[in-house]
Amino acid sequence: MDQSTFGRGLVQNTQSPRIEDVLSRPNPRLSTTPPTSGMTRFNVPMLRWNNLSRWDDFNFQVLSDCFGDILNKHISPINYVQPGPFEIKTLTDLKDMCTRSILPRLDQPMAIGAAELGSRLNQTFPRIYTGHDQLLAGGHRRSALSFMADYDNSHRTHLVVSCVLHGSQWNSEALSNGVPAIAIEPIDRIATYCLLANTRYGFILTTQELVVVRVSGTAHKTNNSCQVEWQAIPWHASGPNVLTITLALWCLVMMSLRDTYRSICGPDQLLPLHRWWKYQNLEGMAVYHHHISMREVFSQPPGASVEERFLSG
């Protein structure tokens, strides 16, 4: 059942904040009770460790270079957010907390971001909405929390899919430590969800962190090998110039709006997140054009991967 992320909550601001201000606020405090049972296991092919890598350029600086002009836009002074604290005993509690406290902060930023990106393409993106436990292609898997949109030729398109776990069941530190078997299983699960939904972007939400992924491979072919890039954001991350959970989710949604940047592709077709096209405008000035956000700047962003292109000025 679709869950509206708007119209619930209690908090109001008296000033008009920027999108980045809203997305940098602290997450609510969680009071957690460890589950009595272990993590549910699925009979899906296990990824190999060499199919897994850190998504290093999914960081605050790169994302700010990509979307900074949109993040500086102001939004309505009213935020419909329940501040917590929240008691988390079950995964349903975790999903409900997101619906009440995390997702509402994304409504206006997503709408403004989609409108701005659409204007750069001379098109209008459909409304973005969320859903709980959405059935994926094949009818055997459900995305715990999904960002979706109704495109003209594809209703209920999954932009970003997810699974949720309790922090006591799994933590991404196990991936860095190379602990075998069960450590990689949640990544394998979210990779399967992405392949079934034909989206590169997904996340694992726990009571301790958000782990974002970018998946490449063959859509709907869950028995084939795929590649997964991942990055972890702690639950407590907040403040200016920090990659927070809400900022990370917003960026995933913005990246997923165009089919050419959302649909599953082969690893050799994925571009670095910090890729910029360089061209000369009609005045002969060098312009740097981001391949996803279409933001244009006149100075090369630090650390950017630059490719010369012939684009109209």
Image: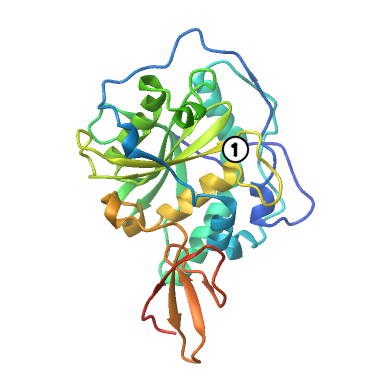
Q: Secondary structure at mark 1?
A: helix
The answer to which image quadrant residue 12 occupies is: top right
Placement of 166 over or under 69, stated as above or below? above
- Position of the N terminus, as image quadrant, is top left
Residue 282 position, x and y percent, is 46, 91
**What percent of the width, then of the height, locates residue 260?**
32, 59
Query: In which quadrant is the C terminus drawn?
Result: bottom left
Residue lying at the far bottom of the rendered structure: 283
215 to the left or right of 293: left
- As displayed, is residue 263 above or below residue 125? above
Residue 71 in percent (x, y) is at 61, 59
Please name whichever residue, 222 or 91, is drawn nearer the observer in this view of the structure. Answer: 222
Left or right: 272, with 259 as reference point: right
As drawn, 48 above or below 62: above
Outermost residue to the top: 36
> Which quadrant of the figure has residue 203?
top left
Looking at this view, is 122 or 179 the one in front? 179
Q: Label 1 neighbourhood size at 10 Å, few (<14), some (14-19), many (20+)?
A: many
Relative side of 222 to 191, left or right = left
Going by the numbered disc 1, the residue's amino acid type is: Ile
User: Which residue is at a point 67% across and 34% down the rendered structure image?
Assistant: 82
State the image coordinates of residue 138 (x, y, percent, origin top left): 22, 32
Q: Which residue is mark 1?
A: 102
Q: Residue at x 57, y 26 (%)?
A: 207
**Residue at position x 43%, y 80% from top?**
279
